[in-house]
Amino acid sequence: MATVVGLSARYANFLVHPLLPGPGVCWVCRGPAKVGYRTCLRCNEAAKLLGAGMADAVVPVSLALKGEQYANELWRYKNAAGPQQQYFRMGLAAVLWRFPAMHEKCIRAHCAVSSFDIVTTVPSTSGRTTHPLRALVAEMAEVTRGRHRDLLAPTPEAVHLGRAASSRRYASAALRGENVLLIDDTGQPATTRSPQQPR
């Protein structure tokens, strides 16, 4: 029988550590930024638009380099069919099980919270009725399953907004002071060696 460690072990061969903060690295998404700037253009535009609505921290699991294995797996777990799709979903679910188990304590400390009461995912705006990431987080990964709650729903205009940051993309269920760990499976488009990211 496959184990979480066994299913995720092969990812050690191709997950790419996020860049360390510093010159030429965006302090938000950890992608490339122009030297002399703290953020990349996308994160700067998002901060201007969203202000206090920005995440307290962005923690990339790995850089997903265009044309390389991890980016390929992120595409296939959504778009492949049959047993191949299940293979990629099981592997990524194992990664999403292990990552919070190993790193959530540090993320909580960075955000100065004692716990993440709710774990949620970013829903699809491409017309999918259900996003496969939701199944990984809400059903497959034990470390997040019991805390999962559907908080976000795409608005009618979401499909027309493209990839630009917008406060009008999603409507959120009410919160009453809960701390939320938001998991997304995309990041800044990486065209060169430069994140899938939980936020």
Image (tube, rainbow, N blue to C red):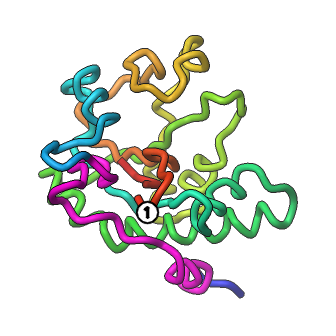
Name the residue: 58% across, 16% down. 160
Residue 176 visible:
no
Image coordinates for residue 122, horizontal then vertical, percent: 50, 38
**Nearer to us in this view, 92 or 176:** 92
In magenta, the rendered stretch is 4-33
Q: How many marks?
A: 1
Reply above or below: 72 against 17: above
Name the residue: 25% across, 32% down. 44
In the rendered structure, which amino acid carries the disc numbered 1?
Answer: Arg
Residue placed under numbered mark 1 in the picture:
193
**Nearer to us in this view, 189 or 159:** 189
Relative placement, left or right, of 182 versus 135 is left
Relative placement, left or right, of 77 versus 35 is right
Reply above or below: 7 against 86: below
Q: Does 22 lie within the magenta span?
A: yes
Relative placement, left or right, of 20 versus 162 is left
Reply above or below: 75 against 129: below
Find the residue positioned furthest to the top.
157
**Nearer to us in this view, 64 or 32:** 32
Q: Does 172 lie within the magenta span?
A: no
Residue 150 visible:
yes
Find the residue positioned furthest to the right.
82
**Nearer to us in this view, 144 or 129:** 129
Image coordinates for residue 163, horizontal then vertical, percent: 50, 29
- In which quadrant of the rendered view does residue 140 lie? bottom right
Quarter in which the N terminus is drawn: bottom right
Image coordinates for residue 178, horizontal then vertical, percent: 27, 38
Image coordinates for residue 190, horizontal then vertical, percent: 47, 52
Mark 1 Cα shell of 10 Å, populated few (<14), some (14-19), many (≥20): few
Instruction: Report helix, strand or loop for mark 1.
Output: loop
Q: Main secondary structure of the magenta part?
A: loop
Reply above or below: 148 against 70: above
